[in-house]
Amino acid sequence: MTVARVTEISTTSPKSFDDAVEQGIARASKTLRGVKSAWVKDMNVSVDNGKITHYRVNLLVTFVLDDA
């Protein structure tokens, strides 16, 4: 039987939402083994003087637990 777990992470990028997602998955994969999918829960931006300075995403990352 396969058992998976979901964890929430937040990541930012000065470039785009897509870049923030890619960075988040890359970072999660360094720590979590068996990453299988991710769901973008929320997206928002930081604004300074009318310009977007950072794109932020909250991801729900699903990974498979190792068998004991």
Image: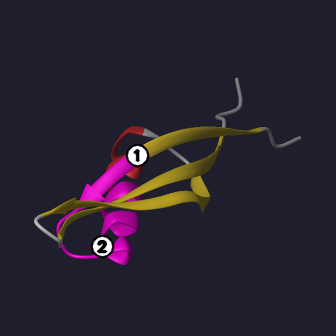
Q: Furthest residue to the left?
A: 49
Q: How many marks?
A: 2
**Camera-side residue of 12 and 62:** 12
User: Label 1 neighbourhood size at 10 Å, few (<14), some (14-19), many (20+)?
Assistant: some
Q: Is residue 28 left or right of residue 39?
A: left
Task: Name which of mark 2 and mark 1 comes first in the sequence.
Answer: 1
User: How far is mark 2 from mark 1, CA to CA?
Assistant: 13 Å
Q: Which mark is residue 19?
A: 2
Q: Is residue 19 magenta?
A: yes
Residue 63's label in the rendered image is none
Point out residue 45 in the picture as x, y percentages from the top left corner.
Answer: 33, 62
> Which residue appears at 62% of the width and 46% of the height?
63
Residue in the foreground of this view, choosing between 58 and 51:
51
- Above or below residue 37? Residue 50 is below
What amino acid is labelled 1 in the image? Ser
Quarter of the view holding residue 19: bottom left
Residue 17 on the magenta span: yes
Q: Please determine whether, in this image, residue 60 is positioned above or below residue 53.
A: above
Q: Secondary structure at mark 2?
A: helix
Q: Which residues are magenta?
A: 10-25
Residue beneath the point at 66% across and 36% down: 65
What number is the disc on residue 10? Answer: 1
Image location (x, y in percent) of residue 37: 62, 61
Residue lying furthest top: 68
Report the colour scheme.
secondary structure
Left or right: where does residue 66 sit relative to residue 53?
right
